[in-house]
């Protein structure tokens, strides 16, 4: 997928590029949308802070960011 979310992308930038990612964070009960750390925390930081698997988080994020796929 071109321009896929990377682990080093900040939450703020990810949400700016793909607003639909807010749903991923909310489903996982992560406080990322609206968090004061969103401009600074990367997706890797989020996975580590919440104790979730980075690969699983990135899979969810990539799936949600892939606007070419339809359910």
Image (cartoon, rainbow, N blue to C red):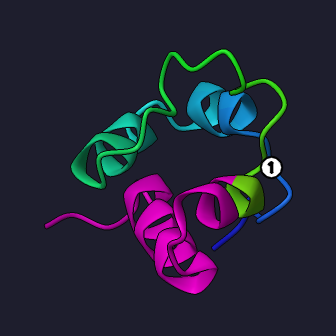
Task: Tell whether 23 sits left or right of 63.
Answer: left
- Residue 8 in the image, given as x and y percentages of width and height: 86, 58
Instruction: Name the residue at 80% across, 49% down.
Output: 9
- Residue 29 in the image, given as x and y percentages of width and height: 29, 46
Q: Is residue 45 magenta?
A: no
Q: Is the magenta stretch mostly helix, strand or loop?
A: helix
Instruction: Name the residue at 54% across, 81% down.
Output: 53
Q: Quadrant of the C terminus?
A: bottom left
Where 55 falls versus 15 (above or below)?
A: below
Foreground residue among 4 and 61: 61
Where 30 falls versus 37 (above or below)?
A: below
Foreground residue among 47 and 58: 47
Instruction: Name the residue at 32% across, 67% down.
Output: 69
Q: Is residue 68 magenta?
A: yes
Instruction: Name the residue at 41% across, 69% down.
Output: 60
Secondary structure found at label 1: loop
Q: Quadrant of the N terminus?
A: bottom right
Task: Tell whether 20 sits left or right of 5.
Answer: left
Q: Within the image, what quadrant is residue 6 found in?
A: bottom right
Q: Give the range drawn in magenta.
A: 46-71
Foreground residue among 48 and 32: 48
- Residue 32 in the image, given as x and y percentages of width and height: 51, 33
Residue at numbered disc 1:
9
Q: Is residue 4 visible?
A: no
Where 35 falls versus 3 (above or below)?
A: above
Where 14 falls versus 33 (above or below)?
A: below
Q: Is residue 50 visible?
A: yes
Task: Tell whether 5 sits left or right of 66.
Answer: right
């Amino acid at each position: 997928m071109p321009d896929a979310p990377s682990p080093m992308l900040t939450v703020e930038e990810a949400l700016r590029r793909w607003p639909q990612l807010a749903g991923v964070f909310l489903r996982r009960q992560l406080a990322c949308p609206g968090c004061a750390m969103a401009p600074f925390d990367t997706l890797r930081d989020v996975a580590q802070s919440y104790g979730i698997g980075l690969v699983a988080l990135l899979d969810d994020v990539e799936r949600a960011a892939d606007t070419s796929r339809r359910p």
